[in-house]
Amino acid sequence: MTWPRPVPVIGDRTHAAERAADPAGWAFDAGSVAALHEVIEARRDIRRYRPDPVPPELLRTVLEAGHRAPSVGHSQPWRFVVVTEQATRDRAAVLADRERLRQAELLTPDRRARLLDLQLEGIREAPVGIVVACDRRAHATGVLGRATFPDADLWSCACAIQNIWLAARASGLGLGWVTLFQPADLAALLHLPDGVETLGWLCLGWPDERPPEPGLMRHGWSARAPLDDVVLAERWPADGSPEAPVSHLAGPRPDAVVAARDSGDDLLAVPGSLGVLDRAVDRVLALPGDEPATGTLVVVAGDHPVADAHQVSAYPASVTADVLAATRSGESLGAATARQAGLRVRAHHAVVPGPQGDLVAADALPAAAVQALVEEGRALGRELAADGLVCLGEVGIGNTTVAAALACALLGLDPDAAVGLGAGADAAMLARKRTVVAGALERARAEHGVALAEPLTALAALGGPEFAVLAGVTLGAAAAGVPVVLDGLVTSISAVVAVRLEPAAQPALVAGQRSRERAHAEVLTELGLEPLLDLRLRSGEGVGAVLGAQLLLTAVRARRTAGRVS
């Protein structure tokens, strides 16, 4: 005789036979499972927000999701401090700004510049801040599961953050997790008692961005590791793999030695008062040309088959012609900046009289075309020098890849150390650029051998039309005795070509800026130049050269008109 199974009115109403018959019976329907994975895949660290308020009922729903997180020993150690007052958010933002700069100083120069380029928080913008704090005042041995893993309470709070994040994303809210704080500073801001620790600040609000991929991937900071690289079978492999995560801490480096001449000893000022500007003025006043009172921005455009052939730019090749046309009409960023600085503007399209190669499969330019383009630039430089100093600018989709290849060939750099983000590459595009530069170098070295170190050969093999013209402009203006103000990597590597051709051109050069491109600092060192500005510009078009020229012209006038001592 069998009896009906007693079914409890509370707890689990299933029994062993049911579970054995359908082990997967606890799963949700396929639509729910797909929706869950869609939300997980779409979760992003949001940095930009709209100011619109978050409805209180929606905020409570999101916090409820966090409160449902798993916790060691069901301890529920999380505490959610909700911050909406502007004054508190402003003070927190200052703490984050301060720590961002501190952390940047610990990185290599390239990583430092790239970190400072990133918006890492939206504390001021997001209408709600949530500080997740972990109440650790209960002794670990008194919480089931913490005696052996004392930090499991912190892990529990991290699970709560993930729940909040996913619930916010499903509702269309954006969330950003900010840890740019000294924990003690954030605890003091919120008056947390001893034994209560923060896990950072969550920015919550309606997003003013909808990124299709993680922001740090988009900005080329890192790429997502393949799943197979992080899944290990049974135990850690005997060979010690996988490798340790990459560290970007700065190592010691030799100080650059800059020869300076002080021509302002009789000024009513401490010698060298203007620092790098004083040294730049010394260079200008030593030139045989007239003291410049104004000048010209020349923007040279060039086309590059490598852009379309290998997808190394975030923008279509047609943008080159668009920016050149806008420069001619005075509406491009470079032209507008020059106009504000009182400089003339000249737009010039460097056209190749023959086929161009894509660097990887064939040389970029015919040898005869290189020589003709350099002479074309030399004549242009002599003409522009009649109106004062010459600022170099450029535009050419794909030309940061070309510049990196030239820098590797002429300076012996490794592609990993030379290839940068350009106008907006993501991690995948950055990897393609490195592959293209490495392939181009391998081909060019095989075809040209040691001759690749010669400037005109390097231009033909790995350069572009605007590089050749810019090198010529540098030579022509320097021969006329006027300063040549460089902009970013493209103009600077063109100046390296010019100096390799005629070393006497070097005293005419002034570095307007150091850009965010990785190889630029090395190229400026090769030229023996200190930049006037370090604004992490990414615009091209001569904007950095113009801003540097403004400083230079102001300092020249100040040197001439400042009071002197007898």
Image (spheres, rainbow, N blue to C red):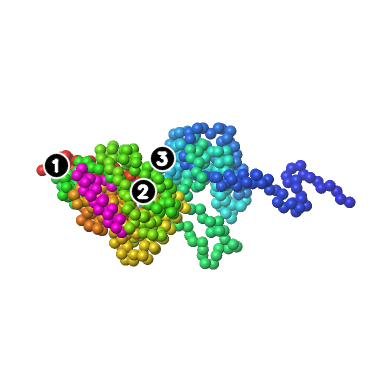
Tell me which label, 2 or 1, sits earlier in the chain: 2
Residue 564 disc label: 1
Residue at 32%, 38% in the rendered image: 329
Question: Which residue type carries mark 3?
Answer: Val
Measured from the top left, where is residue 303 in percent x and y? 36, 50
Q: Nearer the viewer, residue 113 or 424?
A: 424
Residue at the spot of label 3:
94
Residue 145 disc label: none
Q: Check if mark 1's residue and mark 3's residue have beta carbons within 8 Å.
A: no
Q: Nearer the viewer, residue 18 or 551?
A: 551
Question: Which residue type carries mark 1?
Answer: Arg
Question: Which residue type carries mark 2?
Answer: Gly
Residue count near mark 3 (Cα–Cα under 10 Å), binned few <14, some 14–19, many ≥20: some
Measured from the top left, where is residue 536 in percent x and y? 35, 46
Residue 396 disc label: 2
Tell me which label, 2 or 3, sits earlier in the chain: 3
Magenta span of residues? 367-396
Question: In front of the other: label 1 or label 3?
Answer: 1
